[in-house]
Image (cartoon, rainbow, N blue to C red):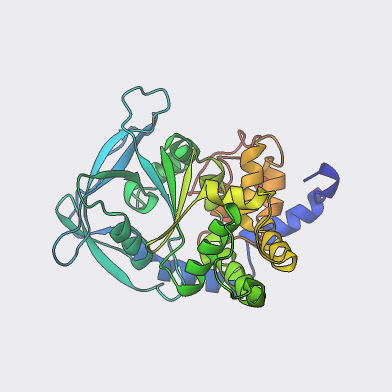
């Protein structure tokens, strides 16, 4: 985004006010949303689940995900303290989960898991992700914000959110969890894989007759709720490598990138190729890939805030805090959940 296309300070101030300090009706709606989303927070039944972290260093917690149990609650894991790898040679190899806490249709539903042998209640979207990712043997070390941060400790939350950029950039792989699979998502993934590595059509049926269907499946894939979450911007952009999951369906990020740029003959009609390629290249993940490929372009806090106004966050302050890890000029601002949205607005201006 060129500087000439950025909004004036006056218009940006107005836009930020509308995002951070919504009108009374919107404020009530967001408050209700936070209450519904509280079911997605970790609610330990027993005290003492979280040992204190070194808030002045780079200490973090990791989830050690184990094979599924033979019955409910199915998912079991341990929680350990370690370091995020920033200057730490002994940091264990770990993955990081990128997902949405709230998921339409499951806002007030919860499921239980075992953490260090204790029953803990989490949101259903996270539960399905852990169920799917649980290894058949051995264990999987993974960083998950809802579990690895004591969400009720504001001081720890401030410190850990400031480290999230490093946490995701140091992870071996970021696992993107779109949510549970459906028929359209499965078909969209097959389409993207085909465009990345087109093969001759082996049936007498003309695939071009399904242009509208294929376009609808790709639109559904790129409109999934995950892509509208503000936190995923830095989680995806900073990742070393990425795998996308939707239930048991899996798509490597590199395959998506290949589909964006594949120059060869697709073996399908020009109309279908143009429509599919257009939808892919104009999608949110394609925008993220452009930012990943050129980290110095469009990474000012002002530019990111302007580009992310349509994204979602349960806490309006996260519309700003969720971008600090990738903004090249955000050193003046620190995460502080004791500040009100109005105070944060003043700090930004």
Residue 245 place in picture, x, y as percent:
43, 58
- Choose top left, top right, bottom left or bottom right for residue 39: bottom left
Residue 226 place in picture, x, y as percent:
51, 61
For the question of whether residue 170 can be seen, the reply is yes
Residue 87 place in picture, x, y as percent:
41, 22
For the question of whether residue 339 can be seen, the reply is no
- Choose top left, top right, bottom left or bottom right for residue 129: bottom left
The mark tally for this picture is: 0
Residue at point 34% right, 34% down? Answer: 93
| Image position of 323 (left or right of 120) | right
| Image position of 2 (left or right of 337) | right
With respect to residue 260, does 88 lie above or below? above
Q: Pick the residue in front: 187 or 85.
A: 187
Residue at point 66% right, 77% down? Answer: 209
Residue 289 place in picture, x, y as percent:
62, 46
| Image position of 321 (left or right of 266) | left
Residue at point 62% right, 34% down? Answer: 332
Q: Could you tell me which quadrant the C terminus lies in?
A: top right
With respect to residue 152, does 32 lie above or below? below
Residue at point 33% right, 45% down? Answer: 142
* Outermost residue to the right: 4
């Amino acid at each position: 985004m060129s500087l000439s296309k950025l909004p004036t300070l006056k218009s940006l101030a107005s836009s930020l006010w509308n995002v951070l300090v919504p009108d009374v009706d919107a404020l009530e709606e967001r408050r209700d949303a936070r209450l519904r989303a509280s079911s997605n927070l970790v609610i330990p039944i027993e005290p003492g689940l979280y040992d204190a972290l070194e808030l002045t260093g780079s200490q973090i917690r990791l989830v050690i995900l184990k094979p599924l149990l033979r019955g409910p609650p199915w998912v079991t894991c341990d929680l350990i303290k370690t370091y995020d790898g920033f200057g730490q040679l002994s940091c264990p190899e770990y993955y990081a989960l990128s997902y949405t806490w709230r998921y339409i249709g499951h806002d007030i539903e919860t499921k239980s898991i075992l953490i260090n042998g204790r029953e803990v209640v989490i949101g259903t979207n996270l539960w399905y992700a852990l169920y799917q990712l649980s290894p058949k043997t051995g264990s999987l070390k993974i960083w998950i914000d809802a579990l690895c941060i004591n969400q009720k400790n504001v001081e720890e939350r401030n410190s850990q959110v400031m480290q999230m950029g490093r946490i995701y950039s140091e992870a071996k792989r970021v696992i993107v969890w779109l949510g549970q699979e459906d028929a359209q998502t499965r078909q969209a993934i097959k389409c993207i894989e085909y465009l990345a590595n087109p093969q001759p059509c082996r049936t007498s049926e003309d695939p071009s007759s399904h242009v509208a269907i294929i376009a609808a499946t790709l639109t559904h894939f790129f409109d999934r709720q995950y892509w509208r979450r503000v936190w995923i911007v830095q989680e995806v952009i900073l990742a070393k490598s990425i795998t996308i999951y939707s239930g048991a369906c899996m798509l490597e990020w590199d395959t998506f990138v290949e589909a964006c740029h594949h120059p060869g003959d697709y073996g399908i009609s020009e109309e279908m190729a143009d429509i599919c390629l257009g939808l892919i290249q104009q999608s949110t993940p394609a925008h993220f890939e452009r930012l990943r490929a050129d980290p110095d372009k469009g990474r000012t806090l002002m530019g990111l805030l302007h580009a992310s106004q349509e994204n979602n966050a349960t806490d309006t302050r996260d519309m700003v805090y969720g971008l600090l890890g990738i903004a090249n000029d955000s050193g003046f601002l620190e995460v502080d959940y004791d500040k009100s949205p109005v105070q944060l607005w003043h700090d930004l201006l």
